[in-house]
Image (cartoon, rainbow, N blue to C red):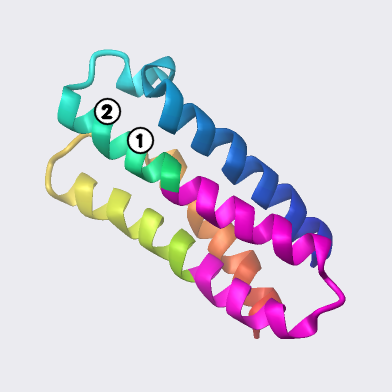
């Protein structure tokens, strides 16, 4: 579980930095509107926050009382990101389903460690 938390936390920080600092580097945001870029930056901020929480839990893994709250927050984050992409697709908005699948898989792994 510790390795999962650290690796995914590091990944969230990395992708969060891209979304926050230069979202237009991502292929699907190259020609995005200012509103879409601002929304992407907000996602980046959230991802960095989640990644930071993961890093703190990983560095202080011996504090078992941190595990459950982190896993709950991580589960909610991944479920909501996957759900938002699914909703966008049903609304006729172009959204990358692979991102929803990735977050759904991370949610399942997180649920495994939580329950």
C-beta proximity under 8 Å, tags 1 and 2: yes
Q: Residues within 10 Å of mark 1 (few under 14, many from 20)?
A: many
Left or right relative to 87: residue 56: right
Q: Which corner quadrant holds the N terminus? A: bottom right
Q: Does residue 95 appear in the picture of this structure?
A: no
The residue segment tinted magenta is 46-75
Residue 8 is left or right of residue 60, and the answer is left
- For marks 1 and 2, give the CA distance: 6 Å
Q: Position of residue 63 (x, y in %)?
A: 80, 79
User: In screen coordinates, is 94 left or right of 50?
Assistant: left
List the residue tagged with mark 2. Answer: 37
The residue lying at 50 percent from left, 38 percent from top is 16
Badge number at residue 41: 1
Secondary structure, mark 2, is: helix
**Does the stretch in magenta take in 52?**
yes
Vertical placement of residue 51 versus 25, above or below: below
Q: Residue furthest left?
A: 91
Q: What is the x, y in percent for residue 7?
A: 74, 48
Residue drawn at x 43%, y 40% as measured from the top left = 44
Q: Residue at x 52, y 32 (%)?
A: 17
Give the side of residue 55 with respect to residue 20, left or right: right
Is 95 in front, or is 77? 77
Which label belongs to residue 66?
none
């Amino acid at each position: 579980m510790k390795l999962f938390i650290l690796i995914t936390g590091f990944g969230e920080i990395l992708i969060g930095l891209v979304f926050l600092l230069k979202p237009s580097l991502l292929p699907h945001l190259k020609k995005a509107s200012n509103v879409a870029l601002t929304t992407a930056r907000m996602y980046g901020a959230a991802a960095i926050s989640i990644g930071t929480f993961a890093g703190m839990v990983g560095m202080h893994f011996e504090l078992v009382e941190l595990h459950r709250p982190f896993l709950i927050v991580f589960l909610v984050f991944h479920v909501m990101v996957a759900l938002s992409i699914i909703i966008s697709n049903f609304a006729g908005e172009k959204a990358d389903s692979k991102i929803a699948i990735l977050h759904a898989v991370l949610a399942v792994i997180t649920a495994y460690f939580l329950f």
